[in-house]
Image (cartoon, rainbow, N blue to C red):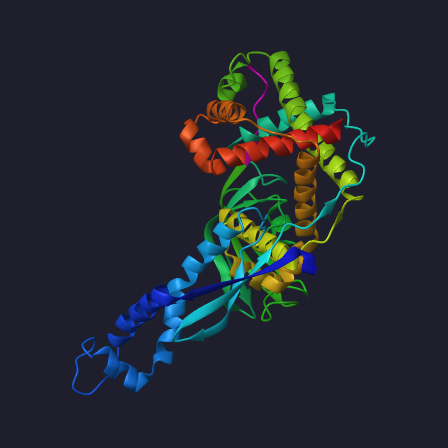
Amino acid sequence: MANKNIKEITIKIDGQEWEEALDKAFQKANQKAKIDGFRPGKAPKEIFLKKYGIESLFMDAAQNCVNEAYKKVLEENKDLEIVAQPSFEIKSINEKGIEFIFTLTLKPEVKLGKYKDLKVKKDKVEVTKEEIDRSIDELRHRFAENVNKEGPIENGDIAIIDFEGFKDGIAFEGGKAENYSLTIGSNTFIPGFEEGLIGLKKGDEKDLNLKFPEDYHSEELKGKEVVFKAKVKEVKKTVIPEINEDFFADLGMEGIVSKEALENQIKENLLARKEIEAENKYIDDLLEVAAKEVEIDIPDVMLDEELDRMIKQYEEHLKMQGLTLEQFYQFTNSDEKALKEQMKDEATKRITYRLMLEEIVKQENIKIEDKEAEEEASKLAEKYKMKKEEILNVFGGLEMIKYDLQMRKAIDILKG
């Protein structure tokens, strides 16, 4: 970490302020003190100090005034650009006062390289007939129905079965189910199981002589020969809807009453999505090219904070999938240190891009007036069907709306 990014500030608390902090610490400690002849909290201060010493109050007293000291640091250094939570340590402490040393991590110097006329091209966007047909096919499959079938099981059919597995004539744990819905060809079961059901009809029974794979997860079953007794309860086939009036009605898409109209709507949707993807890639390419010539000495503390943010974001992503971070570590045989190491390059890139754009804002003297930020907040509220106050709350206030607009204008400068 470069020393020029670090500033140490000494804050001293003494006099009446320190006496009050010590007294508050005494009141707390006295509640738990065991002193002969006195109930908890009732011992005089002189008696308490004689038994425990004034030094016993120092740490609680320090805790009582560290927040005030922190406020003083921020007030006295408003002009400094602090980029990470300040750390502190106690320089000295006695009955007369306490001295804190706060370590401030300052915004590093950013030396910009070339950031205009970057010769980065945006990808052209087009939608092919194959892509439209594939999207319509996906829609049809989404509205597919499973209907009962009288004939034999074929690949792609759904077999509703009862089954039980036996090894050496004895049923094994986890090898039994009733009314199990199995799609033939899905490779859900061990090799040979699904294939063995092909040709059977409703009511048929069959013994399937199979062998578990050598790499099967169960030690008891890997590589072992078994017999599955299976009974077919029902056979269903998947019926994919035709492109007709009923299908258009099921879709519920306004104005879509013909195949041509559906194709046009699908094309429009695909184009819109591809435009967004192309724009995001274009911005990423611009940032990558501009960042190659930027010189920044990123402080370790700043990198650590970014990694902590990314870990929290990843934890939220896992929660949406029904997983905890601890489960992820178990499944992947890793830990927080390994995950942070994996994320380190991305975290460095994010910080570099952010600091680079902030420096462009500074160099280009990009200012955002309150009126412009208020208008942007109103547009966002309308777009997301929210109240303006809610949007401001989500963004963290008008200043963050201004910051976001500055970043976007800096990116516009990269575009040229």
Camera-nearest residue between 185 and 119: 119
Residue 18 appears left or right of 235? left
Camera-nearest residue between 63 and 264: 63
Q: Residue furthest front?
A: 15
For the C terminus, the quadrant is top right
Q: For residue 193, say whether it is visible.
A: yes
Camera-nearest residue between 218 and 410: 410
- The residue depicted at 70 percent of the width and 26 percent of the height is 131
Q: Residue furthest right?
A: 119
Camera-nearest residue between 287 and 27: 27
Q: Position of residue 89 (x, y in %)?
A: 51, 68
- The residue depicted at 56 percent of the width and 71 percent of the height is 168
Name the chief secondary structure element in magenta.
Answer: loop
Q: Is residue 328 above or below residue 43?
A: above
Q: Position of residue 346 (x, y in %)?
A: 68, 50
Q: Is residue 416 above or below residue 85?
A: above
Give the number of callouts.
0
- The residue depicted at 35 percent of the width and 63 percent of the height is 17
Q: Position of residue 136 (x, y in %)?
A: 63, 24
User: Dividing the picture into quarters, in which one does residue 260 lie?
Assistant: top right
Highlighted range, magenta: 237-244
- The residue depicted at 65 percent of the width and 59 percent of the height is 300
For the N terminus, the quadrant is bottom right
